[in-house]
């Protein structure tokens, strides 16, 4: 069965220290759009979407002021002069995320390789064929989930840790 092409950004998988993942509140930069799963960084004291080569603070989870039962996972946009408080799952060295690969023919040899992430807000993926900035360390192929299979090939889901983090 072919893997489903459905980029969703980064999703928490496991913390190797068995600690509860660190979720913290930060102010979002003005005139910014973030979607659940987007990698974020700190710029000028505010959270903004990370792009390849940025040190990653963590992964955007959603607005801080909204009850989880109400937030539907849609993107949020801050207006000019607005700095809403948002929740970020902080990426430490032992924090492992699941993410889709955009490469057409990824190889198992990607394990142990530092690769780049790419994509617009809400559709961030890694590209196991690009190692220019080495944003993410590929750990292994993710286990199958109960929604769709996960086989090595186009649109495979990998487990990664962020190689370039704000908190080392």
Image: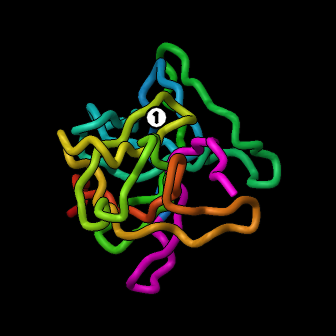
Residue 144 location (% of width, % of height): 63, 69
Q: Main secondary structure of the magenta part?
A: loop
| Residue 151 at x, y percent in the picture | 56, 62
Say which quadrant the N terminus sits in.
bottom right
Q: Residue at x 76, y 60 (%)?
A: 147
For the C terminus, the image quarter is bottom left
For disc 1, the marked residue is: 28
Residue 101, placed above or below residue 11: above
Residue under the point 51% across and 23% down: 82
Q: Is residue 121 visible?
A: yes
What range is drawn magenta here?
1-22
Is residue 25 visible to the viewer in this orientation of the structure?
Answer: no
Farthest residue, direction top: 80
Q: Nearer the viewer, residue 110 or 20?
A: 110
Q: Is residue 11 magenta?
A: yes
User: Which of the 4 image quadrants contains residue 139?
Assistant: bottom left
Taking the image as shown, residue 138 lies to the left or right of residue 131, namely right
Q: Position of residue 68 (x, y in %)?
A: 74, 54
Residue 165 vs residue 118: left or right?
Answer: left
Q: Nearer the viewer, residue 84 or 62?
A: 62
């Amino acid at each position: 069965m072919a893997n489903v092409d459905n980029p969703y950004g980064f999703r928490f998988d496991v913390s190797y220290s068995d600690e509860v993942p660190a979720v913290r509140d930060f102010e979002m930069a003005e005139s910014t759009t973030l979607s659940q799963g987007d990698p974020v960084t700190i710029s000028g004291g505010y959270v903004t979407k990370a792009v390849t080569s940025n040190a990653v603070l963590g992964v955007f989870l959603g607005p801080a002021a909204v009850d989880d039962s109400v937030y539907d996972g849609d993107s949020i946009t801050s207006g000019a002069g607005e700095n809403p408080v948002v929740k970020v799952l902080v990426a430490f060295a032992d924090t492992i995320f699941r993410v889709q690969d955009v490469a057409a023919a990824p190889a198992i040899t990607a394990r142990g390789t530092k690769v780049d992430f790419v994509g617009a807000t809400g559709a961030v993926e890694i590209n196991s064929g690009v190692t220019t900035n080495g944003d993410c360390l590929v750990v292994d192929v993710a286990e199958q989930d109960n929604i769709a299979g996960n086989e090595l090939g186009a649109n495979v889901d990998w487990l990664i840790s962020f190689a370039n983090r704000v908190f080392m």
